[in-house]
Image: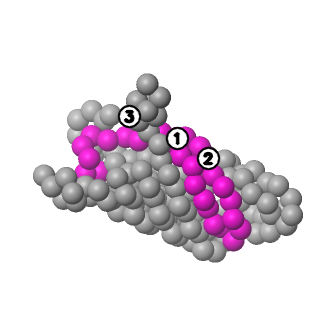
Amino acid sequence: MKKILAFSILMVFLSTAFAKGQMTIHKMLHAGYVYQNQSFGEIGGRLLFLNNDDVIYRMGAAAMMGSVNKEFAILPKLQGDILINFERNVDLYHSYYFLAGAEITTKYVAPKIGASLFGLLDLTAGYGFSLDKNGINGKELKGLNLNFTLNLPLVMLNDLLK
């Protein structure tokens, strides 16, 4: 498990080390649904790093909230994603990205893959590996991991409120 986490972190750092030019950073809010052996609502923030729109890096933090064994629980989560689309000079093909990433909480770590529509709507799946056998409220969080997320760039929200 530690090898998977170390490999994921190493890949993110290596991929940013070989990036050329200056990266643009955008702030985003996100809200969504997470299934990790239990249903959770999720809300948080992300930073989006891009040099061009072929490869996009995202890092963020969120709070997962839900009822586990009839008790309300909040679980902090850190996440990192790489969105990839190598089709150039064709705007229609840039409407979707392939997504690879990982998320880690105090209870599990989950590598994931999926797709993103315009970088705004994500659908990912993975497998969660338990870090704490006691879990949350007595329920161990391991197994299938599904995420559905809506990303809202603060620039877009600012323009809508004007």
Where 28 sits versus 81, above or below?
above
Q: Position of residue 112 (x, y in %)?
A: 49, 65
Q: Residue at x 43, y 46 (%)?
A: 58
Q: Residue at x 31, y 59 (%)?
A: 96
The crowd level at tag 3 (other Cα within 10 Å; few <14, some 14-19, many 20+) is: few
Q: CA distance from mark 2 to mark 1?
A: 8 Å
Give the labeled residue for mark 3.
Answer: 25
Which amino acid type corresponds to the residue marked 3 in the rendered image? Answer: Ile
Q: Any magenta on residue 51?
A: yes
Left or right: residue 134 versus residue 52 is right
The answer to whether the residues at label 2 and label 1 have Cβ atoms under 8 Å apart is yes
Q: Residue at x 56, y 67 (%)?
A: 146
Q: Position of residue 118 (x, y in %)?
A: 34, 53
Give the labeled residue for mark 2.
Answer: 43
Q: Position of residue 19 (x, y in %)?
A: 27, 43
- Residue 29's label in the rendered image is 1
Q: Nearer the viewer, residue 111 or 161?
A: 161
Numbered disc 3: secondary structure: strand
